[in-house]
Image (cartoon, rainbow, N blue to C red):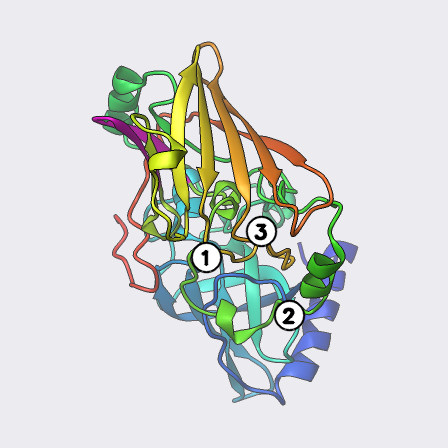
Amino acid sequence: MGGSPHNETRMLRLATLLLVLLVSPGIARAHHSVAGFFDPANQVEIEGIVQKVSWRNPHTVFLIDVAGEPGDVTTWTVESGALGVLRSRGLAREFVQPGDHVRILGDASLRSRPELFARNMLLGNGKEVMLTAGSKPYFSQDSQKGMLEAEFDQSVIDAAIENADGIFRVWTTNIELRPIPGVGFLRGPHPLTEAAKATRAEYDASDEALLGCTGWSMPRIMSNPLPMQFVREDDRIVLRFEENDSVRVIHMDTDLANGPDELATFGYSVGHWEGKTLVVVTTNVQPERLDNAGTPFSADMRLLEHFTASEGGQRLEYRLRIEDRATFTEVIEVGRHWDWRPEIQVAAYECHKDQQLPQ
């Protein structure tokens, strides 16, 4: 690879970034959103020795020792995607260990610190790993080694196929595409009221409140890229999300008039069947943000959802209607879909807790 224009460009970008960052040491804090912290338009590459690995959500964290001038080593903090992203690629195992030599491509810090949001990693054995949703092959373009092989549990696949029933299975987002389908489906642009425009204009993506384990409210939880599962429970349907170990309840034996008065993160949801389509109405959602651009919503928001599994159950179509006169000047209708991959399960999220992955 040495001597190619592609490689020379990589090293020039790396050298430029090192010159700036070596004089500004710092340690990044794991956070729920990378917006306001890393620049996806400025991707750089680093190379060094793995000092420590924390397999955890919301972001896996690697500490990488990068050599500069002779005798000068800078420890870079490298964040990456959630563990669910690795599992969906068949990488639910510890593929890198302290002491390993690696190369990493990622989004540069917006805070002039030695930190990256990693997209791709080249392992010491020459295999490439795509670390985040929406990543594309990078190092393997110049190598014959290719990607690290996926590994899935056949018993999980067999059980999923045997137990699948309409919408009652695990659904997942196709993270191989960029932009990732569904993740930004709430952003619009939508026609906002003047009050909503003002609130959104004041939003700061690097607000300290975003750092750490931030729970998502409805309807934003429906845009997260990690697996979810519909489960029957007596007179209700439970929707289990890997994201933050969240659980949403859909009541099938009552109506909105019998719901509670207090507001809740996911509101109060009542469902019914129209043929094979699950129709859900949700009210009483605690106001938060509609998306990662800071769009607000009010306590008067009303949501209407339609979930329809395709024939054969390979795809789940989703339609969402949002009524909120305090936020939007007209009714909003958006949609997305999920795919069924029987090898995928809803795993424990356990935010910020280091997890032992299979060897």
- Specify start and end residues of the magenta stretch as a single range: 227-240
Residue 168 in the magenta stretch? The answer is: no
The crowd level at tag 2 (other Cα within 10 Å; few <14, some 14-19, many 20+) is: some
Look at the picture and state if 329 lies above or below 80.
above
Which SS does the magenta portion mostly show? strand
Whichever of callouts 1 and 2 sits on the residue coming sooner in the sequence is: 1
Query: Image quadrant for the N terminus?
Result: bottom right
Q: Alpha-carbon distance for marks 1 and 3? A: 42 Å
Q: Alpha-carbon distance for marks 2 and 3? A: 14 Å
Residue 233 in the magenta stretch? The answer is: yes
Q: Amino acid at mark 3?
A: Leu
**Nearest the eye: 222 or 147:** 222
Look at the picture and state if 331 lies above or below 189.
above
Whichever of callouts 1 and 3 sits on the residue coming sooner in the sequence is: 1
Q: Amino acid at mark 2?
A: Asp
Q: Position of residue 249 (x, y in %)?
A: 33, 38
Look at the picture and state if 274 lies above or below 7.
above
Q: Which residue is mark 2?
A: 204
Quarter of the rendering containing residue 354: bottom left
Q: Which residue is mark 3?
A: 290
Q: Which residue is farthest front?
A: 257
Q: Residue at x 48, y 27 (%)?
A: 339
Q: Say the numbered circle drawn on residue 124.
A: 1
Quarter of the rendering containing residue 355: bottom left
Horizontally, is 246 left or right of 102 in the view? left
Q: Is residue 42 visible?
A: no
Q: Position of residue 312 (x, y in %)?
A: 43, 11
Q: Amino acid at mark 1?
A: Gly
Under circle 2, the secondary element is loop
Which mark's residue is nearer the viewer, 2 or 3?
Answer: 3
Which mark's residue is nearer the viewer, 1 or 3?
Answer: 3
The number of callouts visible is 3
